[in-house]
Amino acid sequence: MRDVMLFGEGWNGEVRKVADGAHRYYYTPEENDQRHREAVFSILEYRSFSGKNYWIGFPVIEPSLSDIEWAIMKYQPAPVSKF
């Protein structure tokens, strides 16, 4: 399992776990979750300013570089390991 930061549809870089090699993340909220709605996030690999790679997920519009870097500092996801 790998960390993916989700953006859009009420998400601001919060981390969820996905299977290795996943290209999409399907999110279905619990009935009482008013902050989020059902969404499909496309997953891409992002190379940070530090040189480490991270997975990001977004439904339509890619997040800004500053939003991604902020989320890396705040949520501290595990970087993608090539091994």
Image: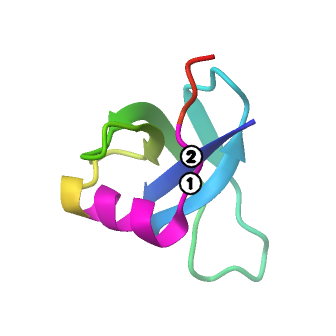
Whether residue 73 is in magenta: the answer is yes
Span of residues in magenta: 67-79
Please tell me which of labels 2 and 1 falls first in the chain.
2
Kind of residue indicated by mark 2: Val
Look at the picture and state if 2 lies above or below 49: above
Measure the C-alpha gap from mark 2 to mark 1.
Answer: 7 Å
Residue 30 in picture, x, y percent from top left: 78, 70
Residue 14 in picture, x, y percent from top left: 54, 65
Neighbor class of circle 2 (other Cα within 10 Å; few <14, some 14-19, many 20+) is: many
| Quadrant assignment, res 34 | bottom right
Look at the picture and state if 67 lies above or below 78: below
Mark 2 element type = strand
Kind of residue indicated by mark 1: Pro
Neighbor class of circle 1 (other Cα within 10 Å; few <14, some 14-19, many 20+) is: many
**Given the current orientation, which residue lies at the most extreme top position?**
83
Residue drawn at the location 59% of the way across and 47% of the way down: 78
Q: Which of 28 and 47 is in front in this view?
A: 47
Residue drawn at the location 42% of the way across and 59% of the way down: 72
Q: Name the residue carrying label 1.
A: 77
Query: Which image quadrant: the C terminus?
Result: top right
Q: Is residue 7 visible?
A: yes
Residue 5 in picture, x, y percent from top left: 51, 53
Whether residue 20 is in magenta: the answer is no
Dots 2, 1 in contact, CB < 8 A:
yes
Q: Is residue 10 visible?
A: no
Q: Residue 4 carries which label?
A: 2
Query: Which image quadrant: the N terminus?
Result: top right
